[in-house]
Amino acid sequence: MKVIALNGSPRKKWNTAALMNSVLEGAASKGAETELYHLYDLNFKGCQSCFACKLKDGKSYGKCAITDDLQPILKKIETADAILLGSPIYFGEVTGEMRSFLERLLFPYGMYTNPYQSLFPRRMNCGFIYSGNIPEEEFPRVSHLRIMEQMLELILGPVESVFSFDTLQFEDYAKVVADKFDPEKKEQRRRIEFPKDLKKAFDMGARLCSL
């Protein structure tokens, strides 16, 4: 089994990345081969509305026609068994890079039929990791994230997600202007709750390769 993972955070060794690594460890525990890509390392843009992917009998029908760093990864996803996506929450949304990636990934496969159909060659297991500075009780404010999960399920396959709440945002709160937060409480949550989130991520990775 092959799992492709996309990190939509600019940080490679912090909350989102740590959670994604746990998911991949869970997948590997079931014998999966894994690959991780950092979107901020890639030179690409979102959908450019060229509609080449929608042209009847066009050479790019059902595929993104843009040639850039994302193109070879999109090809690999077509042969993968599962996909893992991870993003911190910025202003209530996934990062711009993750949003641009999702546009490029999903739009070419979506068919303007009634009802909607997908050109993706098969059903694929999908996992989504979110990390956010907000406490869990504020989650309803970002519940619209489920809309993108619904699109993933429609076009690719079943989706499972893990959200890590109230994460440690800074390594040293004394160096930043962030009076809203209690550094001791943040550190305590990091010690007590974040390992539980890592375990949830690991278990999700194992399930993605067992379904």
Image (cartoon, grey):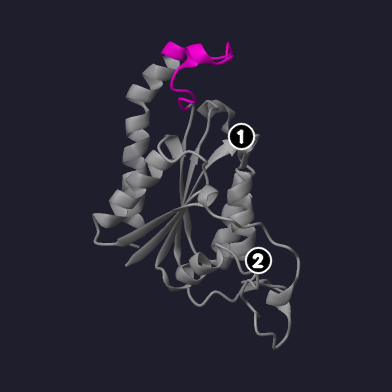
Residue 140: give its label. 1
Q: Amino acid at mark 1?
A: Pro
Residue density around tag 2, few if under 14, some if 14–19, many if 20 or more, within 10 Å: many
Look at discs 1 and 2 and give the one toward the viewer: 2
What span is in magenta?
167-184
Q: Amino acid at mark 2?
A: Phe
Q: Which residue is located at x 29 percent, y 62 percent?
A: 32
Which secondary structure lies at badge 2?
A: loop
Marks 1/2 in contact by CB < 8 Å: the verdict is no
Residue density around tag 1, few if under 14, some if 14–19, many if 20 or more, within 10 Å: few
Magenta: main secondary structure: loop
The answer to whether 7 is drawn above or below residue 113 in the figure is: above
Q: Which residue is located at x 46 percent, y 28 percent?
A: 167
The answer to whether 60 is drawn above or below residue 202 in the figure is: below
Residue sitting farthest toward the bottom: 57
Instruction: Give the residue at mark 2.
Output: 107
Q: CA distance from mark 1 to mark 2?
A: 27 Å
* Residue 209 in sight in this render: no
Quarter of the figure with residue 95: top right
